Image (spheres, rainbow, N blue to C red):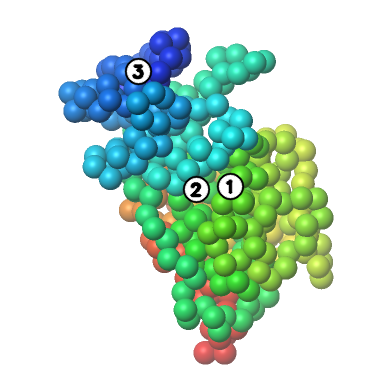
Amino acid sequence: MSAVRVLVVDDSATMRGLITAMLRRDPEIVVVGQAGDPLEAREAIKRLNPDVVTLDVEMPNMNGLAFLDKIMRLRPMPVVMVSTLTQAGAEVSLAALELGAVDCVGKPSAGVPAELAFADLAARVKAAGRARVRPGADRAPAHEANRDFRPDGRIVAIGSSTGGVEALLTVLSAFPANCPPTVITQHMPGTFTRSFAERLNRSCAARVGEAYEGAPLEVGQVWLAPGGDNHLEVVGTVQKRCRLTAAPPVNGHRPSVDVLFESVARAAGRAALGVILTGMGRDGARGLLAMRNAGAATLGQNEATSVVYGMPKAAHEIGAVEQQLPLERIGAGIVDRCSLAREAG
């Protein structure tokens, strides 16, 4: 694959230089230019035609979100947001991911040196260079047909990573208020997950919250794994509940999709449905296979609609995916497979 051509956009000359230096360490990346604000960036994009843009959130003349919105409407291309991962920054960064940004990387902060903050910056930029850009779309509320939905008792487990913000908003918008009990692991910093759960809750008919130790799995409730310090598992016999464990990272992730899926395979067996969405790497493939081997139904996002067809591809290749669907059909597909009406028919 040819080198990924990158334009670095940040109002701080120091930060532009730091990002450029970190990216130039990778021989598969070429930094073709820098810009200090969106007006400079607009001209640089026209002149240089980069493969990927790294974009700051707070800049003069036009903030990063407004500029991102223009990019995604007028000239869609892979964008990696580089922002401060504070709680306030999380809200803005999530809005950027919803608008169509491929990924978000945190800036160095007090106590977090650049070497650590930008440790995977090059990998994320290269992944963005291979991503299928899907501008953030308006999502319709739950389908009218779902008003008569009656859950069949299954648990739904969903795993996602790069591109997962848009994907999860799309999937959950098809859920009725009495959706199947659902647990989600999305690779995301700990400062993001509470804000993301609140955003999902505002956008969906079902109740969405950040999972906590002992949280009960109930009809109409969706639990999102908290980022950073714990894995999310499902445990219990009659009453299933969430368990948070501080075990070491799996596949480089904590929370890990594999850990969630494997726990659901043990706790629920065939009374479950596993779904793997867009994401970089292989996390979730082994766990989804465990679910299928335990009798659960399994779905995977197809290549054409995945921002990064990594996790769904890995799961498909080992036989873990029963059926691949485009993103727009996955939510309805979950509801259909977890419906008593389906069994009656």
Mark 1 = which residue? Answer: 196
Confirm or deny contact between disc 1 and disc 2 (CB under 8 A): yes
Mark 3 = which residue? Answer: 36
Instruction: Give the image location of residue 131, x and y in percent.
Output: 36, 40
Mark 2 = which residue? Answer: 165
Q: Residue at x 45, y 9 (%)?
A: 14
In which image quadrant can residue 275 be found? bottom right
For residue 91, the mark is none
Judge the density around disc 3: few (<14), some (14-19), many (≥20) Cα neighbours within 10 Å.
some
Nearest the eye: 19 or 85: 85
Q: Residue at x 73, y 40 (%)?
A: 230
Q: Residue at x 61, y 30 (%)?
A: 86
- Which of disc 3 and disc 1 is earlier in sequence? 3
- Which of disc 2 and disc 1 is earlier in sequence? 2
Confirm or deny contact between disc 3 and disc 2 (CB under 8 A): no
Judge the density around disc 2: few (<14), some (14-19), many (≥20) Cα neighbours within 10 Å.
many
Task: Look at the image and tell me whether residue 143 can be seen.
Answer: yes
